[in-house]
Image (tube, grey):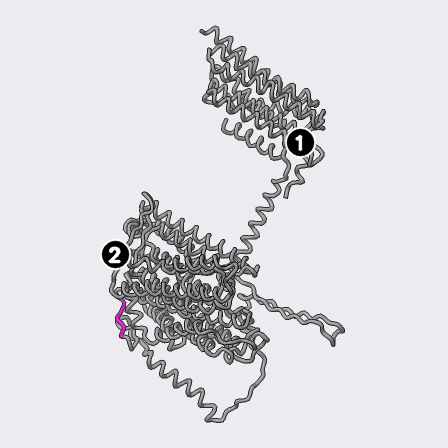
Amino acid sequence: MTGAFLRIKLPPTFFSFYGNLSIAFEMETDRPETASSKTTGKLSSACYLLCAAGCLFPGLLALRDLLLGYSWHVSLPLSGVLTLSFRGGGLSAYFVVILSILGFCVSVYSVGYARHSSASWPSLLLYGIFVSSMYAVFYSANIPAFLVSWETMSLSSYFLVVSDTKNPESARAGLLYAVMTHIGTAFIMAAFMVMYFATGSLEFTAIKAGLSGAGGLRSVIFVLALTGFGTKAGIIPLHTWLPRAHPAAPSNVSALMSGVMIKSGIYGILLVSLDILGGQPTLWWGVAVLSAGAVSSVMGIMHALMERDIKRLLAYSSVENVGIILLGIGASMIFSFNNLPSLAGLALAAALYHVFNHAVFKGLLFMGAGSAVHATGTKNMEEMGGLIKRMPWTGLFFLVGSVAICALPPFNGFMSEWLTFQSLIMGIKTSVVLTKTFMLLAGAALALTGALAASSFVKAFGITFLGVPRSQKAEGAHESSASMLLGMGILSLLCLLLGIFPGYMLRLISNIPLPGLGSLPQFTPGAFAVTGVASSGVLPIVLLGALLAGAAFVFAFPRLAGGRRKTTKTDPWDCGSRIFKKIYKPRKEVRIEYIVKPFFTREIEYRSEITPLAEAYFYRPFVRALHNVAHFAKRLQSGNLQLYLGYILGTLVVLLVVWG
Amino acid sequence: MPKAWVVVYSITDFITIGMLLTVVAMNSLKRMESFLRAYTINSLLLALLMAVSAFYLDAAHLYIAAAVTLVSKGVVIPFLLKKVVRQLKITHEVEPNINTPLSLVISSILVVVVYSSLSRGIFIEGFTENPLKVSISIILISLFIMITRKKAVTQVIGLLLMENGLFLAGFSLTYGMSTIIELGVVFDVLMGVIILGVFLSQIKKTFIDLDLDKLTTLKG
C-alpha cells in the first residue's frame, strides 16, 4: 500500500520542480548566441504551465483524501539514523488543496507576467523549488522532513525576494527577511528539540503519544512554536519583514508568499498546538493566541490604511488577516479549555475557512496589483488612477478581491468573518465570565478591523482604478494578457463560489481530524445556519439577490429621481491619521524653495510620514542597546598587542589565585 | 636509592632556579645581544636539566630529547635570531613600557603568586614540585616581558621563553614526554622562528620600524 502511494503521490508533487529544472538548464545552455527574448518567453511559459499542471494532481488527490477521510504515510530512509517521512490526509490535505488552487492560478498568471518582465532562468527554477518545498512542508510527518522543507521554502523565497538585482531596496528587504525568518526557524528548531529530548522520537505521531503526560514542557513547546511560526505568519511585532519583502518580490511570488507561505506559519501553529500537543489546551495559550490575533488584526489594518505603496498595503492587510485567523484559533482554544467542544469546533472551522479564503482573495489581489504595477511601472498608488478604463478586466477582478477582503456578502470573506463573529458572539453568551470578557474584546477588535479594512480597500481600489490618471505612466497603461486574466478570473470565480456555497466548504473542514471539528454542526449547502449551537443563519443566495437588487436601485434611483450628478470638489479626507494620532505618530512637512519670495517658487516638497510602531518601540531600542554594548566592547579592542597580552596575563594570574 | 634522590633534588633545583634567574634578569637587559644570550643560557640550562634527569632516571629517550633541545634551542634558534637582528640592524630595545625597577618588582610578585597558589596543588610532590612552580613562573614572567617591551624581536624571544617554560612544565609533570612528541614540538618551534623572522622583516619593510606601537594603525 505504501509503495503504491509513493508512486502515486510523490511524483506529481515534485513534477513541477523537475520540469522547471530541466527547462531552466536548457534555457541557460542555449542562451548566449541563439536565444532571442521570444524563445526565452516561450520556454518560461512552458515552464510555468508545467508548474500549473504539477499543482493539479496533488490538489485533486488531497481533495479526495479529505473528502473520503483517507490518510497515507511514506517513509524515505536516507541513512541509518535519518529518515524523511511524509503523510497526507487531514490537516495536511486541507493546506495542500489551498496551495494547489493558488499554485495553479498563480502559475497560469505567471505565464503572461513573466513574458514581459525580465525573468531569468534562476528565478524560474526557484519558483519551482519554492512551490515544491511548500508542498513538502505540508506533507512532512517527522522533524527532519519538516525542517529541511521549511528551510528550503525560506531560502528559495529569500532568493526570489532578492531576484530584482537592479533595486538596492530589494536586497535590504531580503536581508531583513532572511534575518527574521532565521530567528523564527531557530525558535522552531528549539521547539522540535524539546520535543525530541522529551520523547526520543522524531515522528510527529510518536511525539504526540509521548507528550500526552508532560505538563510544563508542553507550554514551553507551545511558546517556542508560537514565536517561531508566528514570525513566518507575520504576527505583530514579528511582522516587520512582511511589508518589506512582499513589495520587493515579483508579484506572482508575493501572491504565493502572502497566500500560502505565511499560512505555513498558521499550519505550524495548528500542527503543534492542536495536533502534536493535542489534548486540552491551557487557558493562557488561547488568551495568548487571541491577543496576538487582536493586536495583529487591528494594527495591521491601521498600517495598511496609511500605505501609498499598493503592495505594502496588501502586505499589511495580510498581517491583519493572519490576525483574524488567530482570533478564531485562540477562541477555539479558550472554548475547548472551558469544555465547549461544539463552539471550539465552530471557531476553528471559521479560522480554517478564513485561511482558505484569504489565500484565494489575497492571491487575487496581489496578482491584480502586479498587473497594475506592471502596466504603469510604479508601485505608488498616487501615480496610478483611472486604470479601470484602461484595464477593465483587471479592475473588475481587483474589485472582486477587494469586496471579498472587506468581508462584504456574497463573497467568501464575508462567510468566514461572519463565522468568526458568530463564534465570538456565542462565546459572549456562555456563562464563564473570563471567556465572555475575552470574546467581547476580540469581537470589538474584529469589528474595528472590518471597518478599517473596508476603508483601506475603498482607498486602494478607488485611488488605483477610479478617477483620472495622475501620471503619464498611468495614462499609457494597457490591459494584461489573457493568461494573467485567466489566473485572476479563476480566483474571482472562486471568491464568489466559496461565498455562495459555504456549506460544502464546511463539510470539507469537518473531515479534518482536529479536536472539535468532528462535532461541527451540519450545514445545509444552500441555507447557511449554525444549528445545534444557536439559531442564527444567513441565506447566501438571498444575500446575493438582495445585493444585486440594491446595486440596481443605487444605479437606477438617481437617474429616475433626477438627482444631482454634477462633480463636486471638496477637501480630501486625511485618512484618519488625526484620529489615530497616538498610534500613527504622523509627521507632516511642507518645504518650499523660492526663487523670489513669495511669488516664484522653484520647488515645493510635501512630505507626510507615519511612524511604524513596532519598529520604533520594539526593534529600534533593541538595536540601539546592541550598538551601545558593541561600542563599549570596542574600547577593549585598542589594537595594541601589549594590551592584549596584558589581558591574557591578568586572566592567568586571576585563575591561578582563584583555582590554584 | 635515597641518597641519589637527594642529589637529584638539589641538582634539579639548582638548574631550574638558574633558568628562573635568567628570565628575571631579562627584565633589566636592554641590549639585544645580551637579551639573546640570556635566552641561550636559559635553553642550555633546560637541556642540561634533561640530561641530568636522563642520567639519574636512566631513561635513554631523555638523552635524545636533551640533545635535540641543545641543538635546536641552544644553537640553531639563537643563530637564526642573531642573523635577523643583524639584518634588521636592531641593537637596543627602546625604553620599555614599564621601567626596570618596577618590572623587577612585578616579576617577583608573579613568582610569589605562583609559589603561594601552587603550594595548595594536589598533584605536586617530590621531584617535580619545584620545577613545575618555576616553569609556571617562567611562563608568566616571559608573558610580562612581552607586555613591557616594544620591539617585535623581543616579543619573539619572549614567546620562545614561554615555550621553554611550557617545555619545562611538561617535562616536570611527565618525566619527559615520548620522543616523537618532543621532536614535533621542537620542529614546530623552529618553523615558528623562521616564519616570525620573515614577519619581522615584513613589518620592518612596511612600518620602517620594528616598534609594535605602529601596529595599532592597522585597527579598523
Residue at (41% x, 87% y) in the render: A552
Q: Which amino acid does label 1 sit on?
A: Ser
A36 magenta-colored: no
- Percent across and percent down for residue B114 are 55, 23
Residue at (68% x, 20% y) in the render: B34
Q: Is mark 1 on a helix, strand or loop?
A: helix
Q: Report the Cα–Cα distance between label 1 and label 2.
A: 73 Å
Q: In this view, does B147 lie to the left or right of A41?
A: right
The answer to whether residue A237 is visible is no
Give the class, few, some or many, for how many residues have Cα within 10 Å of label 2's Cα (few <14, many ≥20): few
| Front residue of this view, candidates A424 and A22 | A22
Please identify the quarter of the rendering in which residue A636 is found: top right
User: Disc 1 sits on a residue from what chain?
Assistant: B
Vertical placement of residue B127 versus A268, above or below: above
Q: Give the range drawn in magenta.
A: A520-524
Q: Quadrant of the N terminus of chain A?
A: bottom left
- Percent across and percent down for residue A250 are 49, 64
Circle 2 sits on which residue?
A4
Q: What secondary structure characterizes most of the magenta part?
A: loop
Q: Which residue lies furthest to the left in this view?
A: A1
In the image, which disc is placed on residue B201? 1
The answer to whether residue A59 is visible is yes
